[in-house]
Amino acid sequence: MTLSGQQRKKLQDALIDAFPTKSSLKQMLSFGLEKNLDVVAGGGNLKVIVFNLIAVAESQGWIDQLIDAACKENPGNLKLKAITQELLNLDPGKSPVPLTNNPPKETNQPQKILVLTAIPHGLRLDKEIREIEDAIKRAVKRDSYEIKIRTAVRPQDIRRAIAEEQPSIVHFCGHGLEDGSLLLEDDGGNNKPVSPRGLVSLFRLHAERVKCVLLNACYSSKSAEAIGKHVNYVIGMNQPIQDRAAIVFAQGFYDGLGYDNVNNQAVIKRAYDEGIIAIELENLLQDAVPSLWENGILCSQLAKEVIPVSHSKEVNDFSPNQNRTAPAETPESRQQPPSSDDLSSARNVDYTKLRDFLKAQKWKEADQETYRMMIQAVGKKEGDWFVHDDLLNFPCKDLRTIDRLWVRYSDGHFGFSVQKQIYLCVGGLPDGEYYQQAWEKFGDAIGWRVKGTVILYDEGIFDISAPPGHLPLGWVLSCVCGWYGSAVSFLTLRLVRCNI
C-alpha cells in the first residue's frame, strides 16, 4: 500500500489520538507485531516517532499490518476507524473490526536457526548441536525451522553468517567470561574475547530480522541484558553453567520451540519454560542460571543476583573443565558477600531492627517494621497512609537499603526489586502508567489477590513458602484505599528512576 501525503498525515493523527503516550504505542507494536518501537522509529517526541514509524512500515511493506494491529488494540477510536476505512477501502457503513480477525498469512519460508560454536575445549558442543537437530526433527512444527551451523567462529564469521543467513534465532554455544564477553577464535585459533558492546552493535544492526538470541555460555546474561534492548527475546546465563546443564537446557528449549502454541503462549517464552523444566528434572538448575529478557525486561522470575568472581588467570591460560566459563574458577576465587549491611538513609532512619528481623526470618515483624520505616522516611508518623507523591518522591537511598535487606535475607525471594520485575513481566510499564489488567495479573501472581479480591493483611503469607515477591506487603495495604494498582505503578516508576 502506498499512501499520499494527506493520508500519512491522517494516519499519524489517528495513531497519536489512539495511543497518546510512547508507552502505549510501544505496547501496541510489541504485542501486535512483535516489533521494538525504539529500533523501528528511533527517538524524539511522539509526533516524530509516529511519523518515522509510518515511513518505515510503508517502505518495508507492513503498513497494512500496522493499521490492523492498531485496530485490534484500540478498536473504538473514531479517528482510527475513519482512516482505516479510507485506506483499506471499506464500506463506510461497516466497522473495520473484521479486519482484525484476518492476520497476515504466514509465509511458507522456514525460520532459520543459526547455531554458532567456538573454543570447544572441555565441552561437548557436538552433542549440543545434535540435540538441537534431533529436537527439531521430532517437532510437530519441524517444517517451520531450518538449522544452519557454523563452527570455530571468529568475530568476522558471526557478522557474515548473520548477514548471509538472516536467521530468526541465533544460538551461541561455547565459553563466556565474567565481564559478559563471549570467547571466539582469532585467525590463529587462539582465544578471542568479544565484548558485550560489540555484540550489542551487531544485533542492533540485525534487530529487524533476529527475534531471539540464546547465549549458552557462562556469564552471558550481561551481554543478553544489553542485547535485549534491541532484540525481542534474549536468553543468557547469570553465572557459570555446567556443560551438561547447557546441553539439557538447549534440548528442552528446542523441544518447546517445536510444540504447538499451547494456550496462545508466546513461542519463545514457552520454549524457555521447557528448557527450565528440562534442567529442573535433571536436578541441574543451579540457582536458575538461564535468564530471559523480553523486549528489554527481565522476565525470568527465577533470576538471582550473582556474586562476582575475580579473575585469577589470563584468558589464554585455559584448562578444560565442565563449566562454560574461562578461566577456570576455584572456590577460593569466589568473593564472599560483605559481612555487614549498608543501612544508610537520607532521612536518618535506623534500619537496624528491620535488618535483625529479616536476618532471623521473622517475616511478619519485618513487614510491619518496613511500613514503619517507610512512613518515617516520607516524613509521616505511624498510622498515616501513603499517597501518590510519597511513592513518587521516596528517597532512593532508603528504598535501596530496604530492598537490599529483603533481597539478601530472603535469598532473592522477596523485595521491591522482585516485585518490580514481576510487575513489568506481566505487562506493567516502567513509566508509572497504570493498566488494570497488569495490576490484576501482578496481584494474582504474587498472592495479593485471591479470586479477584485484594487480600486483607492477616491473609498474607509470612513465610518463605509465599510466592516470589509476596513480601513486603504492608506498604501497599497502607496506601489510600482503592488505588493499590496505581501504588504498584508509582513505586515501580520510583524504582526505575532510582536504578533499583
Image (cartoon, rainbow, N blue to C red):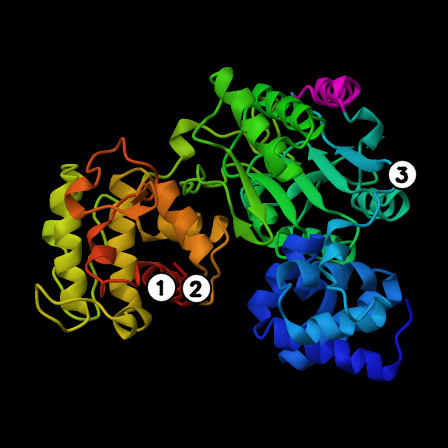
In this rendering, the answer to whether 195 lies above or below 319 is: below
Task: Judge the density around disc 3: few (<14), some (14-19), many (≥20) Cα neighbours within 10 Å.
Answer: few
Task: Judge the density around disc 1: few (<14), some (14-19), many (≥20) Cα neighbours within 10 Å.
Answer: some
Look at discs 3 and 1 and give the one toward the viewer: 1
**SS at mark 1?**
helix
Residue 352 image position (x, y, % from top left)? 11, 53
Q: Residue at x 82, y 61 (%)?
A: 64
Residue 265 image position (x, y, % from top left)? 60, 38
The secondary structure making up most of the magenta span is helix
**SS at mark 3?**
loop
- Pick the front one: 291 or 90: 90
In this rendering, the answer to whether 62 lies above or below 121 is: below
**Residue 382, image quadrant:** bottom left
Q: Which residue, given by chain and number where applicable, does mark 3 sit on?
A: 109
Tell how many labels.
3
Question: What residue range appears in magenta?
Answer: 123-140
Q: Which mark is residue 486?
A: 1
Q: Quadrant of the C terminus?
A: bottom left
Q: Residue at x 65, y 76 (%)?
A: 16
